[in-house]
Amino acid sequence: MASETDSSLEKQCEELYASLFISFGYTDERAREEVRKVIAECKAQSKAEGWEKRPEKFGNWLLENAKLGNTMAIKIVEKARRNGVRDEDISNYWNMKEWERRLLIWYDNIFRIAGYEKFLNEGLSEDLAVKKLNKSFPYYGDPDDSSKCSGEDRPLPYEIKDRVNSYMIKCGFSNFEEIEAKLRNYSSVNAFIRAEMRKGAL
């Protein structure tokens, strides 16, 4: 049975993510039903992979145990720091429940797919649609994965997603076209974000 905290968090996520389905033409009731299904799937996957056995506040645990020499913690923390992630980003992201992190990644993927399909419907080729998408929306994943994008365009770590979102709002970026216009001198949003991080602006 879900705890009161879990139930409250699920309700917040339902409120937040239902708007995505509503934007696709779903009714409010059906949108919430779809979000509840996704949450259930994320929780089932988390349980199947043993995440329920991880310590509470896993981000704090990672930072503390990296100092104590835990190999797994060192690997995660050092990789994050190497890619511009701050310790508070690590704690904030990894302190989330695993199903909540999976839901965040699911939403990010759905949003990118929607953008990609939008550009295809505008008549762009698949290659140009991907390029426009990467110049319009941050791309997250494993920063060491260069199979789809390389160099400055490679994936940003998920740990900085909240910080990037806040910075994009601060910069006044509110839609695909606006972002693309303001980032003409960069190969992608990720390249822009990395440049801003090096300057200390983000």
Image: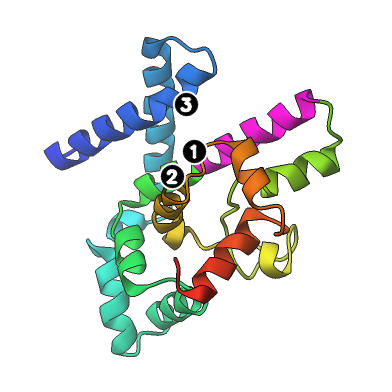
Q: Which residue is mark 1?
A: 107
Label 3: how many Cα within 10 Å (few below 14, some 14–19, many 20+): some
Question: Foreground: 186 or 107?
Answer: 186
**Which residue shows up at 67% across the image and 44% down it?**
181
Left or right of residue 107: residue 112: right
Q: Residue 53 at what x, y percent from top left?
A: 29, 60
Farthest left residue in view = 4
State the predominant SS element of the stretch in magenta: helix
Q: In 3D space, how far apart are the residues under numbered discs 1 and 2 (Cα atoms)?
A: 5 Å
Q: Are marks 1 and 2 in contact (CB under 8 Å)?
A: yes
Q: Give, as a three-letter code, the residue at label 3.
A: Leu
Q: In terms of image quadrants, where is residue 50?
A: bottom left
Left or right of residue 175: residue 55: left
Q: Which residue is mark 3?
A: 20
Please determine whether, in this image, residue 116 is positioned above or below residue 82.
above
Question: Foreground: 189 or 157?
Answer: 189
Q: Are marks 1 and 3 in contact (CB under 8 Å)?
A: yes
Q: Is residue 136 visible?
A: no
Label 2: how many Cα within 10 Å (few below 14, some 14–19, many 20+): some
Q: Residue 109 at what x, y percent from top left?
A: 57, 41
Q: Are marks 2 and 3 in contact (CB under 8 Å)?
A: no
Q: Residue 73 at what x, y percent from top left?
A: 38, 78
**What's drawn in magenta, residue-wise?**
107-122
Who comes first in sequence, dot 1 or dot 3? 3
Was residue 169 drawn as part of the magenta stretch in this picture? no
Q: Give, as a three-letter code, the residue at label 2.
A: Leu
Please determine whether, in this image, residue 12 is positioned above or below residue 128.
above
**Which residue shows up at 50% across the image and 70% down it?**
197
Was residue 115 drawn as part of the magenta stretch in this picture? yes
